[in-house]
Image (cartoon, rainbow, N blue to C red):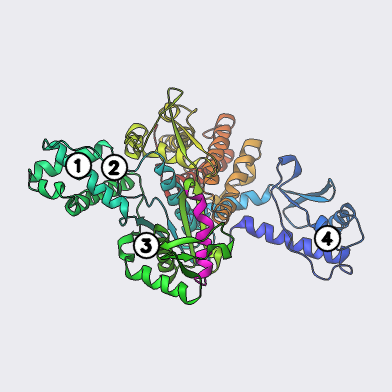
């Protein structure tokens, strides 16, 4: 257990003892004690509202209870003072001594520092991207890709057994439309006058595939195209697009543990799950179609699973797919979806419940849209017209590091404005440049140490209490909170907090660097500061490379 959690455990233990001495006769059972980080530093290191919780079980006012608890709180080594604030908040101020022990902990644990066991080995599947293989990934898909990848990395270091999966939506009408679109372009390239499909895929990539088929086969497949025999065109285009998607995500630093084909669910798995839900009376027949009773779970209307012509809906495939997920032994399933799928969330929760699983075992994270800006103007895109910016275009324009950071730096509930001009700046105005520059600065400091032949004693041999400046304490506090940050991000499934954390860490390092010279004549101070920057370098590198999937350059 990290030292910061031990501090919190000890403080809660002292609080429980103080409560027993203060209001023990009036409280049958002490409620769960929650410690929060105060919004402002002047309010201490921790705060609790336990007195206000207890006041509902006592005739005493919350402020009086808070005062009694404070008066009966036995001190322990790292507690400096306690204050009662407002209607009954208790604020705790810690001494700096514990921070020096954290620095030793960071040194001893190395890259294991920050690892927590929130998950306790639970098996979690994170499914993300899952774009239809009917076209290349566009700029909006990149956001879900990074959110899913970083979340999976976080869950891994938080003690979960994680599997990353891409659902290949390779069944249904959209695949046939892909084949028809290529077939029409193939006909046109061979001089046949044929109108393009109103609902066809119009991107230039369709013509590129058709041209490739023409060069490879000449007019060999023209008769099939004329007769709407599209299997060859569909499968050729499918392989091309899926390989292109795989190449893009691979270049983007994402490796999936499994690529799951929707085709594998047709027809057996879909028929089986439909029959299973029929037997528990969650599926009924009406107007020749089969319907799922989603209204019984709060949906506004029931949903078709098998159409009157006998073909399954996409919803039917989703039902079979989620049953398959849980049958593979996952304790928790997390889906990263685009915001346009919001209406699908409740019905999938209903399906999970109908299949006999805990609805809490399914989490769905909706990712809002991405708007691309260039030179202050929004870049207009139309998927229907085939005019859109691909993810590969963004990678080629700004690089993997910048793109990944920009995609993860905002809450998924907020629309993301992706400023290409800012993304390309090599200055501290660019947030990822600012973060990476902190790591490069430390590397430069350590290189200077080597050049000046400074021999750094082991951390146990130096007096870390030489770290007393405000900037040093701020940096120490940030390093100490790293395990808590990992725990919070994993519990809330909000990986964007990590991007903010590493930015704040870099900011505190830059402030330290500007105020506190590291290589100096006072050897005791120099040694302490060197160990501080080495610890900072370790955590910056860990977050950038292992969690965010971004490089930690040594020179910039």
Residue lying at the far front in this picture: please name it. Answer: 287
Disc ID at residue 184: 1
Q: Which residue is mark 2?
A: 200
Q: SS at mark 4?
A: helix
N-terminal of the pair, mark 1 or mark 2, is 1
- Gap between marks 3 and 1 measured at Cα: 27 Å
Q: SS at mark 2?
A: loop
From the top left corner, tell me how far across and down residue 12 is, in percent: 73, 61
From the top left corner, tell me how far across and down residue 167 is, in percent: 36, 57
Mark 4 or mark 1, whichever is nearer to me:
1
Q: Is residue 381 above or below residue 81?
A: above
Q: SS at mark 3?
A: loop
Residue at 77% in and 62% down: 14
Residue 242 is inside the magenta segment: no
Q: Which residue is mark 4?
A: 54
Give left or right: position of 163 versus 282: left
From the top left corner, tell me how far across and down residue 483 is, in percent: 57, 53
Residue at 51% in and 50% down: 342
- Gap between marks 3 and 2 measured at Cα: 22 Å
- Gap between marks 4 and 1 measured at Cα: 73 Å
**Residue range of the region highlighted in magenta in the rendering:** 341-357
> Foreground residue, 480 or 221?
221
Give left or right: position of 18 versus 240: right
N-terminal of the pair, mark 2 or mark 4, is 4
Labels 1 & 2 near each other (Cβ < 8 A): yes
Mark 2 or mark 4, whichever is nearer to me:
2
């Amino acid at each position: 257990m990290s030292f910061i959690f031990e501090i919190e455990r000890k403080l809660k233990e002292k609080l429980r003892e103080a409560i027993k001495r203060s209001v023990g006769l009036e409280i049958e059972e002490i409620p769960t004690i929650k410690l929060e980080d105060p919004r402002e530093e002047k309010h201490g290191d921790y705060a609790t509202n336990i007195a206000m919780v207890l006041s509902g079980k006592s005739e005493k006012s919350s402020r009086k209870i808070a005062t009694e608890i404070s008066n009966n709180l036995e001190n322990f080594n790292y507690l400096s003072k306690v204050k009662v604030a407002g209607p009954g908040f208790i604020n705790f101020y810690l001494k700096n001594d514990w921070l020096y022990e954290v620095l030793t902990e960071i040194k001893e644990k190395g890259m294991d520092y920050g690892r927590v066991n929130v998950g306790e080995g639970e098996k979690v599947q994170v499914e993300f991207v899952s774009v239809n293989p009917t076209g290349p990934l566009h700029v909006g898909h990149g956001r879900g890709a990074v959110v899913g990848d970083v979340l999976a990395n976080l869950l891994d270091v938080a003690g979960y057994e994680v599997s990353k999966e891409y659902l290949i939506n390779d069944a249904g009408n959209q695949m046939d439309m892909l084949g028809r679109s290529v077939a029409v372009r193939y006909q046109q390239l061979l001089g046949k006058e044929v109108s393009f499909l109103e609902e066809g895929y119009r991107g230039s990539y369709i013509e590129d595939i058709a041209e490739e088929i023409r060069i490879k086969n000449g007019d060999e497949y023209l008769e099939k195209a004329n007769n709407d025999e599209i299997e060859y065109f569909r499968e050729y285009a499918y392989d091309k697009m899926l390989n292109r998607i795989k190449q893009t995500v691979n270049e983007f630093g994402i490796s999936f543990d499994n690529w799951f084909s929707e085709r594998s669910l047709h027809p057996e798995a879909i028929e089986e799950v439909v029959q299973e839900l029929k037997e528990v009376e969650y599926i009924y027949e009406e107007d020749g179609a089969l319907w799922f009773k989603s209204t019984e779970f709060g949906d506004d209307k029931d949903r078709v699973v098998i159409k009157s012509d006998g073909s399954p809906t996409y919803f039917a495939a989703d039902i079979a797919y989620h049953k398959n997920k849980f049958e593979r032994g996952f304790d928790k399933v997390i889906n990263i979806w685009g915001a346009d799928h919001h209406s699908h969330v409740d019905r999938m929760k209903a399906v999970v419940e109908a299949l006999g699983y805990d609805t809490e075992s399914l989490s769905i994270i909706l990712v809002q849209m991405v708007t691309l800006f260039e030179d202050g103007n929004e870049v207009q895109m139309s998927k229907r017209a085939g005019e859109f910016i691909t993810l590969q275009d963004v990678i080629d324009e700004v690089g993997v590091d910048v793109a990944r950071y920009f995609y993860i730096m905002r809450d998924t509930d907020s629309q993301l404005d992706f400023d290409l001009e800012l993304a390309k700046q090599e200055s501290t105005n660019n947030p990822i440049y600012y973060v990476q520059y902190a790591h490069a600065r430390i590397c430069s400091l350590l290189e200077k140490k080597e050049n000046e032949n400074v021999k750094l004693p082991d951390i146990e041999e130096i007096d870390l209490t030489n770290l007393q400046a405000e900037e040093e304490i701020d940096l120490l506090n940030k390093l100490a909170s790293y395990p808590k940050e990992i725990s919070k991000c994993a519990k809330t499934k909000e990986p964007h907090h990590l991007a903010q954390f590493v930015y704040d860490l870099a900011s505190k390092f830059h402030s330290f660097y500007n105020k506190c010279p590291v290589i100096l004549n006072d050897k005791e101070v120099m040694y302490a500061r060197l160990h501080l920057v080495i610890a900072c370098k370790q955590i910056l590198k860990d977050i950038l490379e292992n969690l965010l999937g971004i490089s930690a350059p040594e020179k910039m």
